[in-house]
Image (cartoon, rainbow, N blue to C red):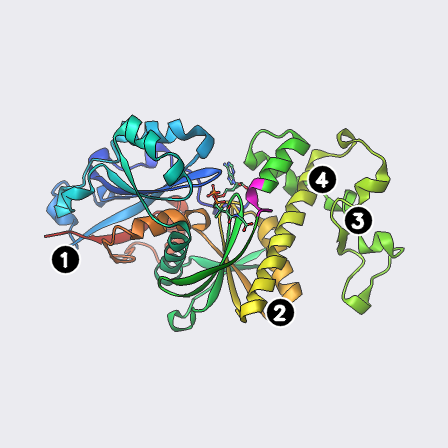
Amino acid sequence: MEGDTIHDLTLLNSPAVDDISHLALDIGGSLIKMVYFSTSREKSVDKTQNKCSKDNLVTGRLYFLKFETSKINECLDFISSKQLHCRGVQHYGFPASDKNTIKATGGGAFKFADLFKEKLGISLDKVEEMGSLVSGANFLIKSVPSEAFTYVNGQRNYEQIDHNDLYPYLLVNIGSGVSMIKVDGDGKFERVSGTSVGGGTFWGLGKLLTKCKSFDDLLEMSHQGNNRVIDMLVGDIYGGMDYLKIGLTSTAIASSFGKAVSDNKELEEYRPEDVARSLLRMISNNIGQIAYLNALRFGLKKIFFGGFFIRGHAYTMDTISVAVDFWSKGEAKAMFLRHEGFLGALGAFMNYQLVEEFPCGARDNNQNPLVEDLKDNGIIECCLRASN
Ligand SMILES: Nc1ncnc2c1ncn2[C@@H]1O[C@H](COP(=O)(O)OP(=O)(O)O)[C@@H](O)[C@H]1O
Ligand SMILES: CC(C)(COP(=O)(O)O)[C@@H](O)C(=O)NCCC(=O)O
C-alpha cells in the first residue's frame, strides 16, 4: 500500500479536549467518518491569541477519524470520552446553539439518530449525502494544496486545478456502493448514475473468497497476487495472440475469473492473493469504465474519484486510471483526492457555515505542505468565523 494514505488518528495525535469544537459525521454503509475542528495546536494558553489577526476568525485545524459502522459503539464511546459534542463550542464566541447538535450525513444519520439521542443526548442535524459529497469535494479541490493528483505509471502527479476551469466535472464516490455525480458548481449538481458493484462488493466477496479478516489484509493480499492465474486473458482465447483489430492486446482481460471455469480447481487450490487481485481488478476496471461512459454522456473531461474503497492503493488507482485512459483514448483524466474518504464528512462540516478561509495562516516552517500533511494524517489548517 502507498505511504501517504490518511489513516486513523491515534489519541496521541488528538488535540486537547477543551479546544475541540464543531464535529461532523458521515455515517456510511461501511464506515463512520468524523471531522472536527480544534484550536489546540496553536500552543497558546490565551484563547484570544487563537483569533486570526483579521476580522473575527479563529485559527485551527480539521482532524479526521474513521470507525467501522458495525462498531458504532466505539464511535459513541470516543465522542463521549472526549466530550466532542459539547466542549469548546462557546469558546471564541461560536454560537451556543450548536451545543449537543451535530451535523451528520450518510444513511446512518437516519438509521442511528435515535441511538445518538439515547446514548449521548445528541441530535443529528441531517445534511443531504450527495450535496455533502459535492461540497466536500469542491472545498478540497479549490482550497487545499496538493489535494488532487493523477496516478500514472506508479507515480502521483499533483495537479494545480484552475478554479476557473474546474466545472463541470464528474465525481465518482466509491463507498459501499458507487454514486456518480455531475458537478456544475457550488451546490449545482446531479447524480447521473451509480452502481451497486463497489467497495462493499470488493470487501464482501473478498472476505467470503479469501477468508481474510480485515480490509487492509485483503488489499495487501491483492498486492501480492497475480490476476492472470484466474482471469481469462485475450491471449488465452486467441492462442497467445493480440486481437489488435479491436484494440486488445494478448494480456488484456477477456473475462474476469474466466479461467476458473475450465481449471476444474476448487477455491482452496487458488492462492487467496490471486483471487484478491482478480477481484480488485474486476471491480476497479468496471467502475473506471462506467465512470468514463458517464463522462462521455455529458462531455466531461475531468473525473475525480473519492470514497474509502480507493484507500490510496496503487493497484486500485492504476487500474481505474488505465480504464479511463483506455476507454477515453486519452481524452478524459482520472484524478484522486488525498482526503478521498472524507468528502461527505467535510461537506457536512461545511454546513455549519462557519468556514471562512482555507487554509488559514501559512504553514510557515515548510515549503511543501504535503510533508506536514503526511505527518499529521491529513490535518487541514483553517479559520472559522466566530460570532463576535
Ligand atoms: N477499514 C475498513 N473497513 C471496511 N471497509 C474499508 C476499510 N477501509 C476501506 N474500506 C473500503 O471502503 C468502503 C467504504 O467506503 P466509504 O467511502 O467509507 O463508504 P460508506 O460511506 O458506504 O461507508 C468499504 O466498502 C471498503 O471497500
Ligand atoms: C445508496 C448509496 C448512496 C449510499 O452511500 P454509501 O454508504 O455506499 O457511501 C450508495 O451505496 C449508492 O449510490 N449505491 C448504488 C446504488 C445504485 O445506483 O444502483
Instruction: Answer whether residue 358 is visible to the viewer in this image.
Output: yes
Q: Is the residue under label 1 in contact with that under label 3 (CB below 8 Å)?
A: no
Magenta stretch contains residue 368: no
Residue 334, image x, y percentages: 55, 61
Judge by depth and name the residue closer to the eye, 33 or 335.
33
Q: Residue at x 29, y 57 (%)?
A: 359
- Whichever of callouts 4 and 1 sits on the residue coming sooner in the sequence is 1
Residue that mark 1 sits on: 53
The three-letter amino acid code for the residue at tag 2 is Gly
Whether ligand 1 has any atom under 8 Å from the Cβ at mark 4 is answered as no
Residue 285, image x, y percentages: 64, 53
Q: Quadrant of residue 7?
A: top left
- Whichever of callouts 3 and 1 sits on the residue coming sooner in the sequence is 1
Residue that mark 4 sits on: 274
Give the alpha-carbon distance from disc 2 to disc 1, as whole Å: 47 Å
Q: Is residue 160 left or right of residue 302?
A: left
